[in-house]
Image (tube, grey):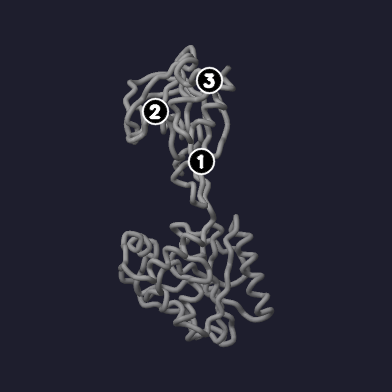
Amino acid sequence: MKEKTNLKIENKENLEKDSIAVIIGRFQIHQLHEAHCGLIEEVLSNHKRVILFLGVSPVIGSTFNPLDFNSRKLMIQEKYPELVILSLPDTRDDETWSKNLDSRVREIFPIGNVLLYGSRDSFIPHYKGQFETTELEQRIYVSAREIRKQISEEIKSSSEWRAGVIYGSYNRYPISYQTVDVAVFNDDESQILLARKPEENKYRFVGGFVNPDDNSLEQAASREFKEETGSDILITSYIGSFRILDWRYKSERDKIMTTLFKAKYTSGHLSPSDDIEELRWFNVNEELKNNNGILKNIIEEHQSLMSILLTKIK
């Protein structure tokens, strides 16, 4: 932790005793640290009326916003029960957020001088409202992001820790994981390239999960193919998007939604890598169905995709 100058409010003698103090922060941490306490106690020592607004993200249980409003409110009120603590939802732009803040303050205190307090890396550069702001200097600088990272790397053996993990898993939105799959054909589309994973005896389309830094589903599909085969493709058409009945998620709230593309193999030496053990070309009209027209050699979760694909390429 880097040493800073002593925490203080400048021009303390000019503060109105009856002014309304507003502290704004996120406090996304498992317990209040020294910098938090210093900020709150300095404001409480100079104001009779204090409101603390906790920023609330629309994204539940994220890395940057892991704790919900009530969890943080209870944490702060354990040490400062006299504090009025309210939520302040994030908005699309600074102007709307500032207008909402000003309105919330005036709903509680229709009249009176208002001072907004923040610390380093706080809301102040984004505030576009009508009230005066004051940045409090901190004696020490503590990175909540770094503390959260350290916590994420620890496993503790306590019922409270396990209860917290369970609470977090339930208090988030169900996730529909986005994946991509590619039906890669040779030049005359008589053959299709399929992949087999270790410990599986049937084949599947080459594909995988979309990364947050992929700019499009097409890019994700090309990237996945490159990672798993070492070769390049040209995507020629969109087949459709489908829910995948992946065995790993059958009993989960979270599910998988995939987008299937048709593509043409263009260049590179085909070599299985990543989580692929074998790559194989199949004759479309001879090796994918048995004599009764039933799909064979295709893993269960990709059979519906293959059926739709074969219908569209007839």
Q: For mark 2, does the 10 Å Cα neighbourhood hold few (<14), some (14 to 19), or many (20 or more) residues? A: many
Q: Quadrant of the C terminus?
A: top right
Residue name at image x 47 percent, y 15 percent? 286
Residue located beneath label 3 in the image = 292
Residue name at image x 50 percent, y 84 percent? 81
Residue located beneath label 2 in the image = 195
Which numbered tag is attached to residue 38? none
Above or below, 19 against 194 in this view is: below
Going by the numbered disc 3, the residue's amino acid type is Asn
Disc 2 to disc 1, C-alpha distance: 18 Å
User: Which dot, 2 or 1, sits closer to the camera?
Assistant: 1
Is 309 on the left-hand or right-hand side of 1? right
Q: For mark 1, does the 10 Å Cα neighbourhood hold few (<14), some (14 to 19), or many (20 or more) residues? A: some
In the image shown, does 91 or 42 lie closer to the viewer? 91
Going by the numbered disc 2, the residue's amino acid type is Ala
- Residue 11 image position (x, y, % from top left): 48, 81
In the image shown, does 299 or 69 lie closer to the viewer? 299
- Residue 246 image position (x, y, % from top left): 47, 41
Going by the numbered disc 1, the residue's amino acid type is Leu
Q: Quadrant of residue 213?
A: top left
Residue located beneath label 1 in the image = 245
Earlier sequence position, callout 2 versus callout 1: 2
Disc 1 to disc 3, C-alpha distance: 24 Å
